[in-house]
Image (cartoon, rainbow, N blue to C red):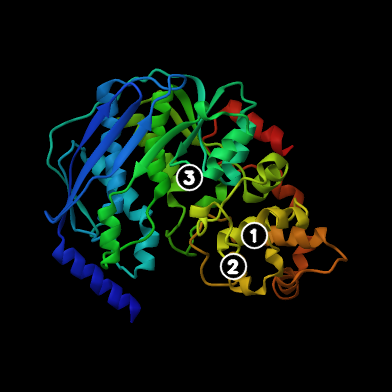
Amino acid sequence: MLVQQNQSHFDNLRKNFTHLYYRGFSIETKNDHIRVKYHFNLSDKYNFYPQLNIPLKSSSSKILNISFLENLSFQIGMIELISYWKAACPQKVVVDAGYLCDFQIEWWKNVYFKGLGEFFYVNGIETNIHEFLNIEINSSKEYEMEEVEVGNRILIPIGGGKDSAVTLELLKKSGFEIIPFILNPRAASLATAITSGFDQKQIFTIFRTLDPKLLELNKQGFLNGHTPFSALLAFISLLAASLSGSRYIALSNESSANEPTIPGTQINHQYSKSIDFENNFRRYANQYLTQNIEYFSFLRPLNELQIGKLFAAIPDQHPHFKSCNVASKTDSWCCKCPKCLFTWIILSPFMEEEKLVKIFGTNLFDDITLLPVLNQLTGQASEKPFECIGTTDETNMALAMTIKKRYNTKLPALLKHYHQSVEAGKQNDPSFEIILKELNRDNFVPIQFMKILKEAIG
């Protein structure tokens, strides 16, 4: 049985690699850059040296108090560590780089366990939050919370998809100075900011590099899988906000990120985009880092249909955005994965088919081979895809809205199948207008920015 084989592999790796050490980090500060280099060690056998490289631009950067920079760098190392821990899942993490109190230890264990829920599930690993990891502190070096000088600026992380484009366009109306922030820039993310009116000098960039040794170990049979990237982004965006003097960090995570990927469980591909993580991170940052910067998700009150409608009204962004992870290295759409099909579906009620074809290069509703993916997206399969996608209700609603819009016209193959066999009656669902107007109250959006959202959805 595959699960038993994977569990056995997991157990053998933990037996052979019992410790992961967070040895330390070094910070190099120059007039034009900051470089942070980490040192992790797996059971005295493998050393890893991942890095962060931060170009400093005179127009948007300032030098931080060194003790605060050390604190942030230390915390970033704790979340960076997760990529190296999952290679062998050692029982013990030994932290030599700084001190963590008991509350912090439990906080990090919670982030690791929930953030690796998909990793454990896909790899067939059975464990629990009490047994999967022990964190041992081997340092008395304490880092203090600091006051940080900030101004009326909003740092907006840009990923290159539709969500951050909507956040960027709407918050330009806030009266605050906007700082687009990109971790490891690619064509789509740069184009999002530039199309919105920002030049490259105004874009704050940070470059993160993994140690190539980790990729070598993966090829040798060490474990690999999903990690909570957005948790890493949270800490790194706090560093970017500190360096740019930004009072706010406005993420673009919507309400649907809260839905588990595996129904009836806490396994969520988007855990580090969820309101649970957002709440926990805000508390952690406020207690152990700084109280001067507020982290929140601007789109949390919205559902995917509302975001799709808002994005459809920004035609300048349509040629550039990319959401496909499969083809991310070539900045294109693979047109075969759940993310591509979901993006097509959520935009289809609000954009004409020929415009969507121009974006994707083909008509995804004509591809009947995507039927298994459609079944996953609409809840007909036992699991949702492990992707950053909307809820099954949002997908079904979007399809029903599209069918209603195409009343008395010939339906393409995938849409015809759905209409006949899945949700044929939903095209008359009276709740369309309601779902496009409602706001999710479970959010941390400041009042002045909530007004912008209310005006946007009408």
Q: Residue furthest right?
A: 408
User: Dot 2 lies on which element?
Assistant: loop
Label 3, on which residue?
275
Left or right: where 112 falls relative to 154:
left
- Judge by depth and name the residue closer to the eye, 153 or 25: 25
Q: Is residue 36 visible?
A: yes
Q: Residues within 10 Å of mark 2 (few under 14, many from 20)?
A: some
Residue 86 position, x and y percent, is 28, 58
User: Dot 1 lies on which element?
Assistant: helix
Q: Amino acid at mark 2?
A: Gly
Q: Quadrant of residue 52?
A: top left
Label 2, on which residue?
379
Q: Residues within 10 Å of mark 3 (few under 14, many from 20)?
A: many
Label 1, on which residue?
395
As measured in the structure, the alpha-carbon distance from the residue carrying label 3 to the one carrying label 2 is: 22 Å
Q: Nearer the viewer, mark 1 or mark 3?
A: 1
- Judge by depth and name the residue closer to the eye, 128 or 64: 64
Q: Residues within 10 Å of mark 1 (few under 14, many from 20)?
A: many
Q: Amino acid at mark 3?
A: Ile
Left or right: where 80 falls relative to 386:
left
